[in-house]
Image (cartoon, coloured by chain):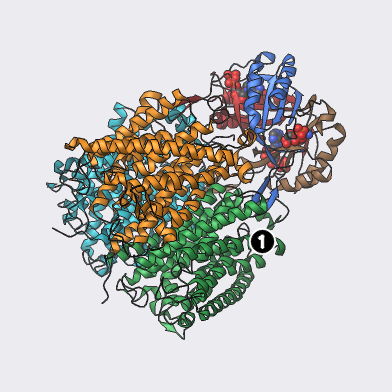
Chain colours: A green, B brown, C blue, D red, E cyan, F orange
């Protein structure tokens, strides 16, 4: 029986808590500050509810589908339904030095935040009931399969040699593309493009961004699944890419729009974090600087130029930041990965291995297509049975009062 | 000169501003208020208790205009804010004795616009 | 008795209060409002998009005074708030029919100060 | 028609609303303001420094009523807000030229209630 | 000399920090958001002050009373006053693989948050000076003895076989019952039941709830006192019960009141966390789902139905959530505990051992009675010497300005 | 090759994240809540930008200057530029049981927060561009050398036997003195002393203070560079001093100004934390109580009495809290240090070793003089080339709108 290492266990316990923190209050406040006052609780509640729902889904069937005994390289079997057989005995396929159940709960927090990211796309207009159903279906039919392909023992993309250290494709591309589909299917918010919709509390947004950055250390460095040098490398590249991307965004904005903004800095940081995610355990800190700069440049373009041209309403830029960032990151891994950093990985193009870049491109293509297609089908299904959008009147009154009968702030003492 | 004060539903603000602009009435002062009228407050739920506040969020507009603009102003506000449902709000019209444009020191009707 | 309402730039509040104090006008009521006037709103940048809101933060003063204080009040406000630039704001003067000091129940001109 | 404006202590709001309800005056508009009157501001302490602001949180009520309701309104407000201590606030009464119920378009005295 | 294990030490260091975070900003913001604008600083300051006061009390005499050499199974002696003899050498009675002083400071954070929880009951009306004195007395005369009985080496309830993994009785019942007594003795807030008293900032409340959830991983999984499989189990049951309880609360509210609310979700989560606390290291994840559902159901009843009927003013539901949750949890441990999960524990009724349920019932009874009685006496004492409530005028003006001469927010720029 | 210890690595990974959290959102919100509404984003953004800029500076040249191969006891060489040679192999000069790169990134977070602290002195009036340039220069020409002298292998103050466990001189004196110089050179804010400038959101300030306290466990206990008894001791002294200082401040204020305030408590806690920093790994918990009390007393004097007398505008008391606190702490280390606590340290005066107090006094003197002089020169340089202060009009309009073209909060829904 493999031995449990207490140091590795301590680090992954903590990393699990950190990734949980990313969803609430991290993502909840990042998004919550960006919406209008009348929608803040509804927005926060989507992150909150996703943590609750997926925590149970994962224990019941999600983990088994994602990491359970492989069925035809496509999906895990239901053999581990309800955590049957998932004990504290380490599973050497995944993490030989920590309890198997710890690997399970660590992965749970990834499964939680992924649908959480999508909520940025349909903020301020989706029905709460439809959102719950959609998220549950999406986790089961989009996240779990993709997760199995890339990370599951026996998964076909994993077998092909895909490199995705902490979820550039599994988490960010899958959710970012789903976000775009959601934005297109649900359509724009009333008044989008004509009425001003300034963020109601940017301090909350920075609070969220800072907690995301903090939690991301658990996300990326925790993905080493041990407290070792690899974790340290991922920690450093994560911080470095975030810093480089935030600065880049600020300077681009300074140049293009005239001033560097706090929201720009925060958005750049998140773009950098999303982009470095798949690469963090395979590239050097210096490569991370380059990746961070590229992340901010490309995401800025997506958010400030392309979105404006195409005029879809991805309310909080879930696609522009996570979708685009994820794609850049997975491809960058194919460029900058180096066996010197991680012998269990591979070399990228810049270290003489074109094949890896091709594999990465396949990963991007497959994830984009699969997520887009299944997300579309699921949305249409939910639309038919429960509807997607609140009524125009409800949208105008705000979701806090119409979906939850409460309001976030009082006016009087 | 008159001062027109309107209390409207917050989500009607954009529409009212548009109607006012159409009517060439560009200057106004806006604030958050709580209204207490015929409309029952929104019910809110706190840990299972339902509470129906009687103070409802409203937006207050203050528009100073010369006499000939009073009716257009009222019309524009009604056009933007009316839903024919309880809570639509009220407009109050009062006489203005004087008006000063701080920038120039101008007084009276010329200062208003 | 008159009610003087002034809408000024927020950062001019301290200066106006000082001028009013100099003119021995000590009582007033202040609130936050959003103004929409000739001044273009400040441009704000959100993720690279520039947005020029047309509602600008202003401060509103309400000062009830007896007739002989109306002009000093206006003068003091203008002295404190004028920069001669667009956005300086407006002063409106209206007639007051009555005034009550809640503490004592006094009415009219004696209650105002 | 008159517009009654009252500036009161925030913690007296509930009492005033109750008195108004008793007097069958149900419609009003409420807002947060900062008052500057005879009452010294509350002293606040920041890292050992005492600072006595001169702007104190108050609540402002705006109540439009027909003539016969003016005195009952004033009475109700005084009944609810009076503590006989400095800071109790003021009531101002002004003439209303017109009133419009946005929902129905009704004008004048009928629209007020 | 027992060997210090660096992995276990790392985890308990971190867990200590996490439990500290639960008090500030966790509890401080959870409660602070629920009060009216004029009382937010006073409310936050109670959590803050309790951390300061009990940190010193614990070092001076609290730890010695709670965990020091046993005197007649009732109380620890003062032999460890001022940490005398509490060094970095592990104490095998409590935690053989970490420094004794680490066990001490970890336990400190439990002693801190417990009186912190009570503050929810007398929010918006207690004098700050009386609160300080009461908290100090309560920690010494209620918390320390109960802690010794259940967790102290030689404590009589521990000897009887009581199972309280992370403080269902020690922390939640003791404080929840004290909260009820406080609410009854202090009486209602002015206007309670007639004037509306909506929470002034529910975003703050969610922030607090999220940080409580996050910190609770240290609270429960840290109670394994090692980075091992038991810690992982407690981590998973904690998250699962919170998720199940939050969802249950939302659905009950949806059914009963018409809408699922954010405050309901947050309250449900805290109820689930409080309830799983004593059971977290003894039950399986699937049992945790059941416990979470029960927690939300019963606490909802207490808060939404019973409180309304009995008309006491437990301002922020410290009793309804922690008191009731704690009782449900300690009893549930007697039902769901299993030696398969924790061989050092025992089986509960559902695993064939009725005796354990009886023991648990005794623990509940003893804790309820002792806490109620001594809390009452202490309150009366403080009332006589210093008074308890602020004056009616101070209550109406708000505690921020009258107790602390400051206000939380400005109105102008 | 020295062996990596997974428990130590886990703890320092986590500590690194904790120290990062101190800067954002910790410091950002602590300071952000204290300024006026119109400057909150600009204030938060200074903490945010400093994290980004110094993260890159450190990787490129900062770490090498600070900890690289010694040049004449004065500075590190540029041999480690761009992390050349800084791998996961432990460096026994600094931390024998964790990856060298982990030591590097842990130290990075100290280099980040130090210029962050200074921002309190010039809040609400410094140009963003000038701030960026000044911070980069300051990190390079003030922080890196002082860091090398006291902590770098071969540094002259280290060789002299200076004791500075976690940065009383390196972090707090250096930044606190720089803060004073900044306040003097930039001059007062418009209206300072005449117009009221109350904190716009004290809840944010408490949030920041609480997160600083939480993160400080990583700062001080992490400075043991291992998960061992020394870390535990630093953890306990840190918490104890913070608690004692917060209470002392409250009581002094109660006595002097009439009421204990939340801002006073929070300020006292931060003063206690800053003061215990250099001593935390050398003194006992009981000494920490005394140090905490002294910290609050002296800093209260500095902030409430001296500042008022001298009438410089250290907007958020960066000098009064960190400068003064740091000096008190470094000297207190010379009084209370004991080899019983840390055999690798030394005894202080109270344990019979006057020499240590002298050494500590030299450290204080050198740090004060060097930081003051170089800060002054750097400020003058920046003033000449880019200017320091925003225009009077910009100051009056607020930095959020004039420096960043955004505003933190909306007024309408
Ligand atoms: N007599 C009044 N005095 C002051 N404010 C009023 C008065 N009547 C209405 N209002 C304001 O207008 C708002 C809408 O009034 P309400 O009676 O609900 O509208 P409607 O007449 O369309 O049903 C109220 O909430 C209140 O703020
Ligand atoms: N006619 C008006 N009615 C109501 N408010 C007005 C009117 N004119 C100006 N204001 C208020 O005064 C503010 C300043 O007005 P603006 O026209 O920009 O000033 P200026 O005349 O000095 O250029 C506006 O933002 C608005 O709040
Ligand atoms: N002349 C006035 N003009 C405008 N507001 C006034 C005036 N007098 C009083 N107020 C408002 O009423 C509030 C209470 O006034 P104050 O003089 O303190 O009350 P009292 O007369 O009962 O002592 C003030 O804070 C201010 O907001």
* Displayed quadrant of residue C100: top right
Q: Position of residue A245 (x, y in %)?
A: 54, 58
Residue count near mark 1 (Cα–Cα under 10 Å), binned few <14, some 14–19, many ≥20: many
Q: Which chain hosts label 1?
A: A
Tell me the quarter of the picture where residue A341 sits. bottom left
Q: Is residue E213 left or right of residue A26?
A: left
Return the x and y of residue E120 as percentages of the image width and height: 40, 42
Residue F131, position as x, y percentages in the image: 53, 43
| Foreground of the two, C33 or E86 | E86
Quadrant of res E217: bottom left
Q: Could you tell me which quadrant the C terminus of chain E lies in?
A: top right
Ligand 2 resides in the quarter of the picture at: top right
Pick whichever, E62 or F140, lies toward us: F140
Residue A349, compared with residue E149, is above or below; it is: below
Residue at the farthest bottom position: A72
* Residue F38 visible to an observer of this rendering: yes
Does mark 1 have its CB less than 8 Å from ligand 2? no
Residue lying at the far right of the rendered structure: B68
Please tell me how many numbered marks the rendered image carries: 1
Of residues E411 and F6, which is closer to you in this image?
F6
Quadrant of the snapshot with the N terminus of chain E: bottom left
Observer-nearest residue: A132 or A163? A163
Instruction: Look at 40% across and 81% down and name the residue there.
Output: A69
Left or right: A208 in relation to E214:
right
Horizontal side of residue D82 vs E31, given as left or right: right
Q: Label 1's element?
A: loop
Q: Position of residue B17 (x, y in %)?
A: 76, 45
Residue at the spot of label 1: A313
Observer able to see residue E212? no
Find the residue positioned furthest to the left: E72
């Amino acid at each position: 029986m493999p031995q449990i290492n207490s140091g590795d266990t301590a680090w992954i316990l903590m990393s699990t808590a950190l990734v949980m923190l990313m969803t609430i209050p991290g993502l909840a406040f990042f998004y919550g500050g960006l919406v209008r006052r009348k929608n803040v609780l509804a927005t926060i509640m989507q992150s909150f509810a996703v943590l609750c729902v997926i925590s149970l889904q994962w224990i019941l069937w999600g983990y088994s589908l994602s990491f359970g005994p492989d069925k035809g390289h496509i999906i895990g079997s239901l053999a581990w339904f309800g955590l049957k057989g998932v004990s504290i005995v380490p599973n050497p396929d995944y993490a030989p030095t920590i309890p198997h159940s710890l690997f399970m709960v660590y992965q749970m927090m990834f499964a939680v935040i992924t649908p959480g990211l999508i909520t940025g796309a349909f903020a301020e207009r989706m029905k709460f009931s439809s959102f719950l159903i959609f998220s549950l279906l999406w986790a089961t039919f989009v996240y779990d399969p993709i997760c199995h392909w890339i990370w599951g023992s026996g998964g076909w993309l994993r077998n092909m040699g895909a490199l995705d250290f902490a979820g550039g494709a599994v988490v960010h591309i899958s959710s970012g593309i789903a976000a775009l589909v959601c934005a297109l299917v649900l359509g724009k918010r009333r008044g989008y493009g004509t009425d001003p919709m300034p963020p109601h509390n940017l301090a909350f947004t920075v609070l969220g961004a800072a907690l995301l950055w903090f939690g991301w250390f658990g996300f990326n460095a925790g993905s080493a699944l041990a407290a070792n040098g690899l974790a340290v490398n991922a920690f450093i590249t994560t911080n470095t890419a975030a810093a480089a991307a935030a600065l880049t965004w600020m300077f681009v904005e300074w140049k293009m729009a005239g001033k560097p903004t706090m929201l720009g800095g925060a958005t750049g940081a998140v773009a950098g974090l999303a982009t470095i995610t798949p690469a963090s355990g395979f590239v050097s800190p210096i490569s991370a600087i380059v990746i961070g700069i590229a992340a901010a440049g490309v995401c800025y373009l997506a958010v400030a130029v392309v979105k404006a041209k195409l005029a879809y309403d991805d309310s909080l830029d879930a696609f522009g930041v996570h979708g685009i960032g994820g794609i850049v990151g997975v491809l960058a891994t194919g460029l900058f990965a180096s066996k010197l950093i991680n012998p269990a990985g591979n070399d990228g193009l810049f270290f003489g291995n074109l094949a890896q870049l091709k594999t990465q491109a396949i990963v991007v293509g497959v994830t984009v297509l699969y997520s887009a297609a299944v997300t579309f089908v699921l949305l249409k299904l939910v639309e038919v049975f429960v509807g997607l959008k609140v009524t125009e009147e409800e949208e105008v009154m705000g979701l806090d009062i119409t979906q939850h009968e409460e309001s976030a702030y009082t006016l009087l003492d | 000169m008159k001062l027109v004060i309107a209390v409207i539903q917050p989500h009607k603000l954009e529409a009212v501003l548009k109607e006012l602009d159409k009517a060439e009435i560009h200057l106004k002062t806006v604030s958050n208020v709580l209204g207490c009228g015929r409309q029952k407050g929104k019910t809110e739920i706190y840990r299972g208790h339902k509470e129906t506040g009687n103070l409802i969020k409203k937006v207050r507009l203050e528009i100073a205009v010369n006499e000939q603009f009073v009716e257009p102003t009222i019309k524009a506000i009604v056009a933007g804010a009316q839903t024919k449902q309880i809570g639509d709000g009220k407009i109050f019209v009062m006489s203005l004795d004087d008006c000063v444009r701080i920038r120039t020191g101008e007084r009276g009707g010329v200062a208003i616009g």
